Amino acid sequence: QQPVQSPQAVILREGEDAVINCSSSKALYSVHWYRQKHGEAPVFLMILLKGGEQKGHDKISASFNEKKQQSSLYLTASQLSYSGTYFCGTISSGSARQLTFGSGTQLTVLP
Amino acid sequence: NAGVTQTPKFQVLKTGQSMTLQCAQDMNHNSMYWYRQDPGMGLRLIYYSASEGTTDKGEVPNGYNVSRLNKREFSLRLESAAPSQTSVYFCASRSAGTGPVEQYFGPGTRLTVT
């Protein structure tokens, strides 16, 4: 069962902040965040593991609430280059470690 | 270091034709994956290979077959293409093991079946 992302779309002005949420009905081992620009492949942003370990780009921050099986991606002081579709992917505890992706959040940053 | 490469980039098929999508990675990753992405949708897993010599079905395997030729290469075959298989296909790879291991995607193959 795929994770649920919210909102489906968001429009910002440069410099504004945004939060994208991802929730799952299953117990999670990890949450992965990717950004995809139109016509391109998804690009890795961040991984958060159960237990607190995480890895990602310096300018991206995210949280993982293990009790609620939810993750949030925080985009602060947005730039035009942040525009794209953001996907969360989840790996469930006890699964064969394949990622299941949400349907995406389309972020548009306007000048 | 090319990362994950896919061929071809674009393909148009007629209904009933067959074709093989090729994928290769040079990062010595154990696990490889094939996804499809339909317009406005997320990525859905077709097949994956956790290690050389093994393959398993994902969420949407019907109409596809795969071959893990060696550690580097993982191909996806459409035996008899249908319009419902019009999509963008992404190959991905990831290292094995626990810990924060990211997945790398290839540039995609845009397939149209008429």
Image: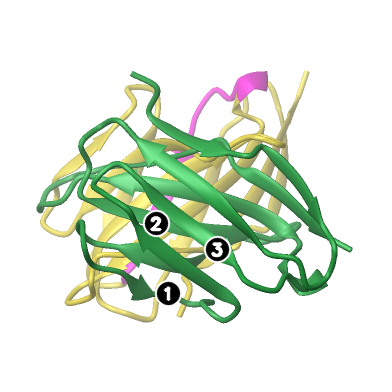
Circles 1 and 2 in contact, beta carbons < 8 Å: yes
Cα–Cα span, label 1 and label 3: 15 Å
Q: Depth-wise, is mark 3 or mark 2 nearer the camera?
A: 3
Per the rendering, the colour in which chain A appears is: yellow
Residue that label 1 marks:
B58
Residue A42's spot in the image, x, y percent?
A: 52, 40
Q: Which chain is home to disc 1?
A: B
Determine whether, in the image, residue A64 is placed left or right of residue A108: left
Instruction: Give me the residue at 20% from left, 36% from top.
Output: B28
Residue that label 3 marks:
B77
Comes first in the chain, label 1 or label 3: 1
Residue B114's spot in the image, x, y percent?
A: 89, 63
Residue A70's spot in the image, x, y percent?
A: 36, 64
Q: Secondary structure at mark 3?
A: strand
Q: Specify whether disc 1 shares its chain with disc 2.
A: yes
Q: What is the magenta range?
A: A69-81
Amino acid at dot 2: Tyr
For residue A99, say whether it is visible.
Answer: no
Comes first in the chain, label 3 or label 2: 2
Cα–Cα span, label 3 and label 2: 13 Å
Between B79 and A47, the residue placed more toward the observer is B79
Instruction: Give me the residue at 45% from left, 80% from top.
Output: A1
Q: Which chain is home to disc 3?
A: B
Amino acid at dot 3: Arg
Q: Specify whether disc 3 shares its chain with disc 2.
A: yes
Between A92 and B44, the residue placed more toward the observer is B44
Give the chain ID for the green colour. Answer: B
Residue A61's spot in the image, x, y percent?
A: 36, 35
Residue that label 2 marks:
B33
